[in-house]
Image (cartoon, grey):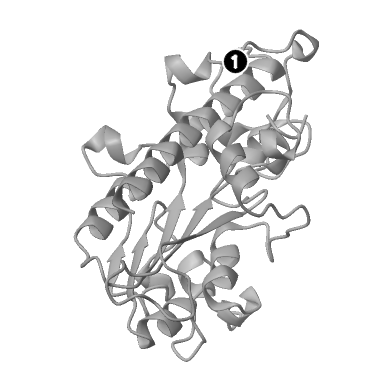
Amino acid sequence: MDGVRPTAGEARRWLAPLVGAALAFAGCSQTPDPGAGGRGFLVVVVDALRADHLGCYGYDRDTSPNLDALATSGVLFEQAWSTAPQLLPAHVSLLTGCDPNLARRELPPQVPPSMLTEWFIPYDTPRLATEFLSRGYATGAFLDHPWIAPLYGFRPGFSEFRETQVDERRRPQDLAFPTPLQAFEQWLRNQPRSQDWFAYVQLHDLGRTWHNPDPKWDTFFEPRAELSGVPPVGEADHLFFAVPRARWGGGVRSLGEYEAQYDGAIRRLDQDLGWLLAKLQQQG
């Protein structure tokens, strides 16, 4: 099943789908009240989150009560597609509105291809953050993967840019770093109440699921009996109906256990998003 093979959770490359929850808060009238709080626009991007494992898209497990409530009270898009199945180019499009190949360099044959040599967003590219900043908005990026970094041209337009300090196998909280959600909430709390703001928060929690056992959430859901077979392990990174060796944790876990682990990680992530939504409501 697609939802459990680690290829779907391989957030270094896959965003399936790339979910941008655009939330508008506080004061969207044409003539803002000078005494009211500033307007805020928040984009939350969750790497490797599958639409078909969310309740609002018809999944049978209760993986996403907070996201489901948000979808019920707002707008849910049923036909939304990423411009690329890889992490970096998908974020390029989200932040620029352009085809991701705009950031892909044509290399001479003698230059070995790598992330550093192949990708960089040109400085003169239109940028969502720059448009907000030029209109007086405070702009902040709170990031959770080393590829979304100034090294690849993501910095311009953000007055606050918090790039990740952890790798794919460790979570920020494991090293006493604030998570991107916590860093954003702290930043917003320090803004003047009248300040308009735009924030971009990227979450890589689901990509770390395969390397970070969590006894509580890995067993939050019971494995399905019909998925009791053990999936094969392959050598390549991009596989269908097999576990890439890079995501295989050893042993003979069943397909149902992989699915339950992934679903538990979504439930944990949904709890964190619920915390953030409650904080935003408290702040008005």
Work out whether residue 246 or residue 37 is closer to the camera in this orientation and state it. 37
**Residue at the bottom extreme?**
124
Residue 199 x %, y %: 39, 64
Residue depicted at x 68% and y 33%: 55
Work out whether residue 179 or residue 238 is closer to the camera in this orientation and state it. 179
Residue 245 seen in the figure: yes
Work out whether residue 82 or residue 131 is closer to the camera in this orientation and state it. 131
Vertical position of residue 145 compared to residue 26: above or below: above
Residue depicted at x 66% and y 77%: 99
Residue 214 x %, y %: 43, 20
Classify the position of the C terminus by image quarter. bottom left
Vertical position of residue 63 compared to residue 79: above or below: above
Work out whether residue 178 or residue 117 is closer to the camera in this orientation and state it. 178
Quadrant of the image occupied by residue 238: top right
Q: Which residue is mark 1?
A: 221
**Residue 253 left/right relative to 91:** right
**Residue 4 left/right relative to 171:** right
> Which element type, helix, strand or loop, lies under badge 1?
loop
**Residue type beneath disc 1:** Phe
Quadrant of the image occupied by residue 106: bottom right
Residue 235 seen in the figure: no
**Residue 191 left/right relative to 55:** left
**Residue 29 left/right relative to 63:** left
Residue 274 x %, y %: 44, 37
Classify the position of the N terminus by image quarter. top right
